[in-house]
Image (spheres, rainbow, N blue to C red):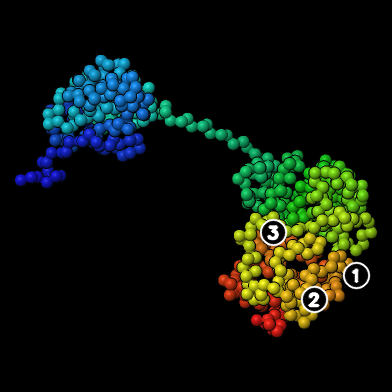
Amino acid sequence: MRRPRGEPGSRAPRPTEGATCAGPGEPWSPSPNSMLRLLLSAQASAARLSGLLLLPPVQPCCLGPSKWGDQPPGGGLHAGPVQGLQRLLEQARSPGELLRWLGQNPTKVRAHHYPVALRRLGQLLGSQPRPPPVEQATLQDLSQLIIRNCPSFDIHTIHVCLHLAVLLGFPSDGPLMCALEQERRFRLPPKPPPTLQPVLHGGQRLEAALSCPHFLRRPRQHLIRSLAEARPEELTPHVMVLLAQHLARHRLREPQLLEAIAHFLVVQEAQLSSKVVQKLVLPFGRLNYLPLEQQFMPCLERILAREAGVAPLATVNILMSLCQLRCLPFRALHFVFSPGFINHISGTPHAFIVRRYLSLLDTAVELELPGYRGPRLPRRQQVPIFPQPLITDRARCKYSHKDIVAEGLRQLLGEEKYRQDLTVPPGYCTDFLLCVSSSGAVLPVRTQDPFLPYPPRSCPQGQAASQSTTHDPAQRVVLMLRERWHFCRDGQVLLGSRALRERHLGLMGYQLLPLPFEELESQRGLPQLKSYLRQKLQALGLRWGPEGGCG
């Protein structure tokens, strides 16, 4: 009766020539006892040996010529002798014969022949009923051959030889295993020496943190502590510029840090050029923060008077920040609106951007400075201030509520009763604009001039934003999206550029209807948003529909 496979007493299957050799990193078969001690022990049985070591053949693709630089089978001048030696090793009938083939053919032996010999040795010792006797001298000679040639092995050959030597039971502290392990370590890439971090203090630590390319929003306590620990001589203009740029970039309206920048500017006034000052002043305008430092404005006025003719673009940048703070100095305005300054910047590479900023400053003078009597920007030099949505809005359009609000207005009012992204004189881009009759009815925009005249006709300077400044009976209502990124990081204070736009639109006579991001984010779906917009418009007394009634 045929005995089922795997029953006790059944003979272990002979390994086939097509089996795959485990490569580096694969699990090795356990070897509880030393194979060499078992081979030299009289009690060792053939069945026990075959159960301990079933070594698959070395795969030609792993140990063949492509890995060790030999010619492929059947090709090249030395392909025949090399492949012939491999066949002789695979067919050797005793360990002594293996050693003889390796020792007598030194010019034909390649690195991959040694794993072949180790594999054949395992087959001879583990698969025959009566293993041939093995002399210690034979094993030592084979070990010495491998030790002598292993410096020429590549990392794959070393891994395979280590694998086979472990399975054969060579002691882990023996010369063969130690030599192979040493060569394996030599092949590993060297570890770079640990970099010693210098000890940084005060301003150095602050500069290192702010200069780090991966530095986004450092904990505020860390910034304040680093600033407090810095000695006065460590707070260089470079460090303070990095801090100012960091606050402006990340919309961090931190009073302690902003006051420190203002104090530094006042103390170092004599050493600072206008090109540095423009960077230090930037966060104050952007974050809509007027410092408590009493000498802040007098200091800037002195710097502008001293440096206005040296760096025109820096001068205008400083005035732009002060315009957002509603702190424009008359003397500096006299200078930048003078014919000499305008003619000077006309031939410079940054002429267009300076003209745009001067147009904004002229608008601020028109709307916010009734007492100014100096020169103004000539009409032929004026350009639209912001003819399209700001860069931050374009970059974050996929996060904006503008599309869903537009769809809500379309379904609520109809496409003909609002305009989206309309730029009104002198160059402010509006989110949504409605034309409303004196009775509150929303009118089709195509039947009305959507623009209010600029400059406003007989406009009392500084009048309330809600009061109309024209004799046109139609009101212009501007829906202003207040997205999350339109505010400082705390979400409470509008950024300076946003506050300036709303302030100027209101002074020109547009009625503003803000749509805060907190309210927009709380609407779940278009039906809720339409209900929200209806409530907002009705709160202003607006009516719409076929007969002017609410639809």
Numbered mark located on residue 488 in the image: 3
Q: Residue at x 79, y 60 (%)?
A: 427
Instruction: Give the residue pinned by disc 2.
Output: 474
Residue 294 position in % (x across, y down): 84, 54
Q: Comparing marks 2 and 3, which lies closer to the viewer?
A: 2
Q: Say what secondary structure mark 2 lies in.
A: loop
Instruction: Give the residue pinned by disc 1.
Output: 458
The type of residue carrying mark 1 is Ser
Q: For the residues marked 1 and 3, what is the alpha-carbon distance in whole angstroms?
A: 36 Å
Q: Give the quadrant of residue 545.
A: bottom right
Q: For the residues marked 2 and 3, what is the alpha-carbon distance in whole angstroms?
A: 35 Å
Q: Residue at x 18, y 28 (%)?
A: 124
Q: For the residues marked 1 and 2, what is the alpha-carbon distance in whole angstroms?
A: 18 Å
Question: Which quadrant does the C terminus fall into?
Answer: bottom right
Query: From the viewer's perspective, is 114 left or right of 541?
Result: left
Q: Give the quadrant of residue 241.
A: top right
Residue 442 position in % (x across, y down): 73, 77
**Category of crowding for the residue at label 1, using alpha-carbon neighbours closer than 10 angstroms: few (below 14), some (14–19), many (at least 20):** few
